[in-house]
Amino acid sequence: MSLPRVDLPADARPDTLAVREGLAPSVWGEHSEALFLTSSFVHPDAASAARRFANEEDAFVYSRFSNPTVAMFERRLAALEGTADCIATSSGMSAILLLVLALLKSGDHIVCSQSVFGSTIKLLQEFGRFGIATSFVSQTDPAAWRAALRPETRLLFAETPSNPLTEVCDIAALARIARDGGALLVVDNCFCSPALQRPVQFGADIVMHSGTKFLDGQGRVIAGALCASEELVRTKFVPMQRSAGLSLSPFNAWVVLKGLETLSVRMQAQSARALELARWLEAQPAVERVYHPGLESHPQHALAMKQQHGCGGAVLSLVVRGARAGAFAVIDGARICSNTANLGDTKTTITHPASTSHGRLSEQQRQAAGITQGMIRLSVGLEDVEDLKADLLRGLATPS
């Protein structure tokens, strides 16, 4: 949209954009962004309405596909990701649904990491019923991605770091493979957010978000988004959203918009706590393995530090002795950590991926992704790290 922008210097940096970018204030001069709770917008005359519905004149028409509050969120997230445009959706999963509906047809093919979020795997498999096939490959092996390409491949889909093993893929390498194969590279940037990682800087074409996670940051609403070129957003995503209605509500957009204002400071603080906790967990006798990109023991540590501005992120996973019983003992022993599969909250969350977020996958699929029964995922919040250590120690000290 060519609607008025906030008057900011052209060289404004990301932390400034996270607080300031959006639409210009209304005639009332509000300082906090306005919340436009309206389903439709009134037109000055019939001819104006006709032009607006025909996309011949920029204006807000109907909140299923155009709303000022949602537009403010879209502009701000696009600025942070370094893309020309963005479209907001009702959830992260609906963003993936919109992506496939808008860009693919029967006979097309997707190459996807086998380590992505369980619901992403299930959704892509569902598209097989409509003639869109997906090949799942190793997250960290570019050769496997290249080998999986077909003449009909249209998308490469990666999530980095992955959920829950925090595996890091080489975005630049996958971008080259995608270009060579005439496909687009999509990167789920949920774990890092643009505060730590901007995939387009490494060649990604589309950045997908579950705004439910770190973008909101306090576990309040469900939201999603796709950040991409203006051509993709305006000619592909917006028309499909207008028809399908995968829309983000203005209220949820406003909540996530305000969450973006503190994104950078939250990510830095939560990442620092996560790294300290990960190092402590590596020294615990009941812990077999810890996965966090900030650890020197992480297989892709150097790559993560390059792609993620030297920061490992706020999510870690650990494998405890005693398999499922050992994992359940740690989770049930926690009095501070919240037993919930959500992540990105200021409150630390703890979950057992094999029976929750990835519970709908087959055991074979979980094993291929490295998700064992003894694995626990932590999304570290803003509590005192010493309290978190004590909370986990209650279960780690329990014989399994």
Image (cartoon, grey):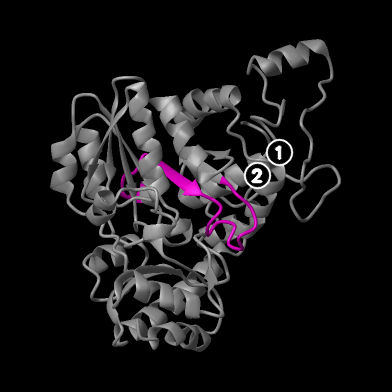
Check residue 206 for magenta coloring: yes
Check residue 9 for magenta coloring: no
**Viewer-side residue, 103 vs 21:** 103
Q: Secondary structure at mark 2?
A: helix
**Viewer-side residue, 190 vs 181:** 190
**Viewer-side residue, 43 vs 399:** 399
- Residue position for label 2: 72
User: Label 1 near label 2: C-beta < 8 Å?
Assistant: yes
**Magenta part of the chain:** 200-223
Residue at (17%, 37%) from the top-left corner?
148
Percent x, y for residue 151? 19, 24
- The N terminus lies in which quarter of the figure? top right
Residue at (46%, 74%) from the top-left corner?
331
Q: Give the amino acid at mark 1.
A: Pro
Percent x, y for residue 81? 47, 49
Residue at (29%, 54%) from the top-left corner?
366
Viewed as shown, does residue 57 lie left or right of 93? right
Q: Secondary structure at mark 1?
A: helix
Distance from disc 2 to disc 1, alpha carbons, whole Å, reads 6 Å
Q: Is residue 184 visible?
A: yes
Residue 68 bears which disc, if any?
1
Q: Is residue 311 visible?
A: no
Helix, strand or loop: magenta stretch: loop
Disc 2 crowd rating (10 Å Cα; few below 14, some 14-19, many 20+) is many
